Amino acid sequence: MLVKKSKITNYIIIISVFIITLILSPYYIYQDQFYYIKIYNGLKGLDLISAYLYYINNLDSKEVMHFFFSWIGSNLSIDKVVFYSFVNAYLAFVAIKLMRQLNASIYIISFIVLSNFYFYVLYFSAERLKFAAIFFILSVLYKNKTYLYTLFSIFSHSQFIIIYSAILFKIFNTSFTRLINKKNIFLAIFITSFIL
């Protein structure tokens, strides 16, 4: 019974995010959204190459994942508000899944997904970053596809190179520390000499 109740709570949160963004998105039409709306509408009917050229000429961005999903939504004739409300609901879904995997309380999950400032930034203004965050979370959730989702995350927003670099540094640092702890000091010095 507890599992069923938690799934129902998850769905309520996800549907709430969809409805909130469906209601509020039409009012957020300035700043970045002005350009995102223009591009989304301008992609309709264009072939992939022409659409990408249109995208990079009208938005100072070369990240392909936001372009690709916007092109798909636009060419399926899905209203931008509706399309991105679904994307926001999916962001909420993967975030909930990750937090559940980390044994977070449903109250904490609800609070974060429904009221956190940074989630609202992702829901309404940071569209490219939203896709990067989705793929980042997927890279954490699905270990067998980590490399694929990592690439998608970086192709969504190049800023994620910094995050993945920090993760790689942590892995390297942990491995290096283990090497030193195993009294293989000569090997550690040898490896360090090549790095420096």
Image: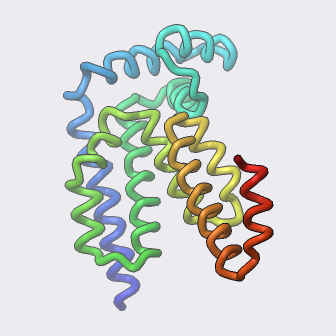
Is 191 placed above or below 130 here? below
Image coords of residue 182 (percent x, y): 71, 82
Image coords of residue 120 (percent x, y): 27, 44
Q: Residue at x 40, y 14 (%)?
A: 38
Q: Residue at x 46, y 67 (%)?
A: 98
- Front residue of 62 and 165: 165
Q: Residue at x 46, y 31 (%)?
A: 78
- Front residue of 18 and 55: 55
In the displayed structure image, the side of residue 103 where residue 140 appears, left or right: right
Image coords of residue 171 (percent x, y): 62, 63
Q: Residue at x 76, y 53 (%)?
A: 193
- Front residue of 175 and 167: 175
- Front residue of 172 and 23: 172
Name which quarter of the figure residue 111 lies in: bottom left
The color scheme shown is rainbow
Name which quarter of the figure residue 173 lies in: bottom right
Image quarter in which the N terminus is found? bottom left
